[in-house]
Amino acid sequence: MNKTAIVLGATGLVGKAVVERLLSDDWREVRTLARGPLGIRHDRLKQTVIDWERLERYGGEFEGTDAVFCCLGTTIKQAGSRESFERVDLEYPLKAAGLAREAGVTQFLAVSAMGASPHSRNFYSRTKGRMEEGLSRAGIPGLHLFRPSLLLGERDEFRPGERAAAWLMTKLEFLMAGRAAKYRAIKGVSVARAMVHIAAAGPMGIHIYPSDVIQALGKDFEEERGTGTGQ
């Protein structure tokens, strides 16, 4: 794959899976911008340790990039306050989108959340909705917003609330059919597969992918690769 990608949030559940997928798919270069190293090495992986409060200093990293994968995300508990949460889930993605536009990036793919809406009464959903709204105004030719349900997978940090919810949702999955399918919990690697699949295709315009569509895209991608059993 003769393309270069940047992954933001590469130390997180989806971000790590995106990096691994891009490398396995032989993208020409995979760049990560993070507070620290990922703990892996690869001849096509370029890791840059950055200060997110000075993201504008790293605009040069976006030059020559075909796709930006924005997998940034935290929790209010982890961030410490609503203001800190907004910096990670709203301000940083919008700043990155601005740098991407200035560098001529044509594809920007961001992890949002089910229920995202700038008008939501829920602070988390409202913040994600504001992020989507801001990204839609950024002027990037191809914008892709992924709205997964509850994410499944091993994280570096322990999130007891998410773990309990994940256990419950997997037990109730048999009830989630038809229109309810979009509420099924989804594995982080499935989201990563779908994102890389879309980036490789490179469609223009603004696109929103609900959780059930993300699941289907990830599955189809594996079938195309001929590896398609499990997640």
Image (spheres, helix red, strand yellow):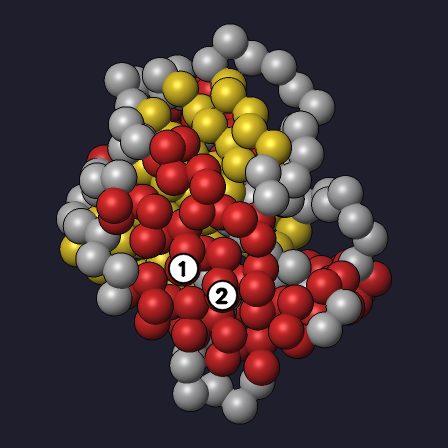
Report x, y in % for residue 115.
47, 75
Q: CA distance from mark 1 to mark 2?
A: 6 Å
Mark 2 crowdedness (10 Å alpha carbons): few <14, some 14-19, many ≥20: many
Compared with residue 175, is residue 69 higher up or lower down, i.e. above or below?
above
Dividing the picture into quadrants, the one containing residue 146 is: bottom left
**Circle 1 is placed at which residue position?**
94
1 and 2 marks in contact (CB < 8 Å): yes
Q: Can residue 191 be spotted in the picture?
A: no
Compared with residue 60, is residue 82 higher up or lower down, i.e. above or below?
below
| 24 left or right, relative to 156 | left
Report x, y in % for residue 57.
46, 41
At horizontal 46% and vertical 14% (from top left) the residue drawn is 44
Compared with residue 118, is residue 218 higher up or lower down, i.e. above or below?
above
At horizontal 70% and vertical 24% (from top left) the residue drawn is 39
**Circle 2 is placed at which residue position?**
90
At horizontal 18% and vertical 45% (from top left) the residue drawn is 203
